Image (spheres, rainbow, N blue to C red):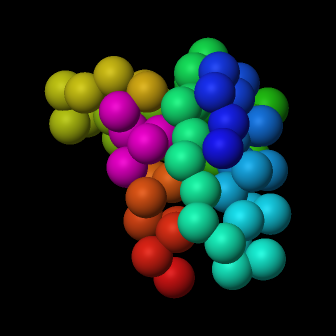
C-alpha cells in the first residue's frame, strides 16, 4: 500500500507488487510527464488531446500496464 506516492514511486510500487504477485493499493500524486521522464511527455500530450488532465491520463496508462 502506498499513500502520496509521488510520480516515480507509484510506478516502483506497482512494479514491485507485480513482480511479487501481491495485491496493492496506491494513491498516486504529483503526476509528472515531461520530456525528461520515461514517457517523454507523450502521456501529457495524449491527455491534452483527450481533454483530460495529466493525472487522469497517467492513471489510465498505469491501469493498462497492470493488465499485462
Disc tally is 0
Left or right for 53, reference 64: left
Q: In which quarter of the image is residue 21?
A: bottom right
The reply, left or right, for residue 12 in relation to residue 41 is right
Specify the segment rendered in magenta. Answer: 56-60
* Quadrant where the image shows the N terminus: top right
Observer-nearest of 56 and 17: 17
Q: Residue furthest left?
A: 51
What residue is at 75 percent from the left and 50 percent from the top? 13
Residue at 78% across, 77% down:
19
Closer to us: 25 or 56: 25
- Where residue 42 sits in the image (x, y, percent)? 52, 42
- The secondary structure that most of the magenta stretch takes on is helix
x and y, in percent, of residue 49 in the image: 25, 34
Q: Is 45 within the magenta?
A: no
Q: Residue at left 20%, top 36%?
A: 50
In this rendering, the answer to whether 22 lies above or below 45 is below
Name the outermost residue toward the top: 30
- x 67%, y 72%: residue: 22
37 relative position to 48: left or right: right
User: Is 16 or 42 nearer to us in this picture?
Assistant: 16
Q: Is residue 16 left or right of residue 11?
A: right
What is the x, y in percent for residue 24?
59, 56
Amino acid at each position: 500500500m502506498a499513500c502520496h506516492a509521488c510520480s516515480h514511486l507509484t510506478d516502483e510500487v506497482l512494479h514491485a507488487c507485480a513482480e511479487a504477485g501481491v495485491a496493492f493499493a496506491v494513491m498516486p500524486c504529483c503526476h509528472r510527464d515531461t520530456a525528461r521522464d520515461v514517457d517523454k511527455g507523450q502521456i501529457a500530450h495524449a491527455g491534452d488531446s483527450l481533454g483530460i488532465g495529466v493525472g487522469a491520463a497517467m492513471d489510465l496508462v498505469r491501469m493498462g500496464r497492470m493488465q499485462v
